[in-house]
Image (cartoon, helix red, strand yellow):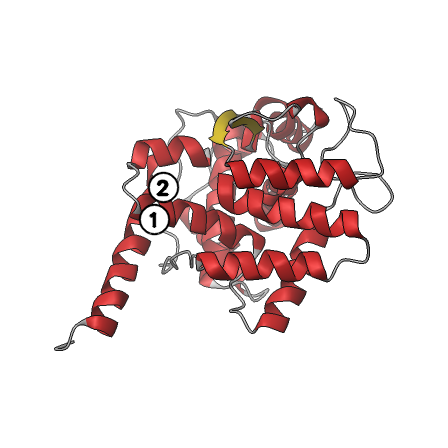
Amino acid sequence: MSLLSEYLTFLTDNRRMSPHSVRAYHATADRLTAFLQLHWGATVDRTTLMKISAADMRAFLADRRGDGLTNRSTARELSAARHFLRFALGENATLPPMKGPRVQRSLPRPVNPDDVLALADDVAESANDGWVGARDWALLLLLYGSGLRVSEATGLLGDILPLGTTLRVTGKRNKTRIVPLLDQVRTAIQEYIALCPYPMAADEPLFRGARGGPLAPALVRRAVQGARMRLGLSERTTPHALRHSFATHLLAGGADLRSLQELLGHSSLSSTQIYTAVDTAMLLDEYQNAHPRA
């Protein structure tokens, strides 16, 4: 088995990454090995990779820059290349010292609760069938009320029924977590189930597409895009922004970071800490708008 094939197996079986992440990481590894083969004029394997230097990595990134990569994309490419090298050379291997380009981290933009309801209502009203509208209403309330990713919500199966006060969700890398299920969200899901023309089997998707198959996340994003344009909302009003809103509003309400980390399914607390900056930014906005001397 080739090194790239081994890496693909590692990403899917060992790390259990999402299909999107697998494609991205494997594509970077493929680009890096192809570049090094031309750069060195030799076959790239574990032995030859041991001699890789910072100059080689800079040459690779310069080549990728020629393809029009932004700072953010270049930083991701470097991170993915390091991930591949750690796999190929071992976790304890000394990798070439290399700093990526500076990337300004943008803050998540939460959606106002009233806008969340307006968005969900518009999506539901625009549906062709009554049961589809009930589905979209329930799904969007679930994203905001429980902080789910779109893929997590569309990946739910009928085995979660009957609904209780909490929900077990499978997130990235097959990591499971327990999230709250608000009364309003539970009622919306139950009303959708009552209208859905397809049976709710334990091994079938909870949220169905028009023909009874799994609901594609892309359809949810497209429906939200149409609604935000009709309502004149920001381009940042996306299904994922509802998850940001869940986190920001919980933090503003007094939730601690560790609890929020568990609810969001973040593997690292640093991923959750960005919401403290969002909370601070919101407070400053309120100050600027309300203080007479601001």
Q: Residues within 10 Å of mark 1 (few under 14, many from 20)?
A: many
Q: Residue 12, position in %: x, y? A: 64, 28
Residue furthest toward the bottom?
293
Q: Residue 128, position in %: x, y? A: 81, 58
Label number found at residue 21: none
Residue under the image location 71 percent in, 41 percent down: 192
Along the line of sight, which residue is nearer the eye, 231 or 213? 231
Task: Say left or right for 30 vs 271.
Answer: right
Q: Is residue 267 above or below residue 56?
A: above
Residue furthest toward the left?
293
Residue under the image location 12 percent in, 77 percent down: 293
Q: Is residue 41 above or below residue 67?
A: above
The answer to whether one can see residue 98 in this image is no
Give the total number of marks visible in the rendering.
Answer: 2
Q: Residue 274, position in %: x, y? A: 33, 48
Location of residue 160 (image quadrant): top right
The quadrant of the image that shows the C terminus is bottom left
Q: Residues within 10 Å of mark 2 (few under 14, many from 20)?
A: some
Label number found at residue 272: 2
Q: Amino acid at mark 2?
A: Thr
Residue furthest toward the right?
211
Question: Under tag 1, what secondary structure?
Answer: helix
Along the line of sight, which residue is nearer the eye, 35 or 9? 9
Q: Is residue 219 above or below residue 182?
A: below
Location of residue 93 (image quadrant): top left
Q: Amino acid at mark 1?
A: Tyr
Name the residue tied to disc 1. Answer: 275
Along the line of sight, which residue is nearer the eye, 147 or 21? 147
Q: Residue 189, position in %: x, y? A: 65, 38
The answer to whether one can see residue 124 in this image is yes
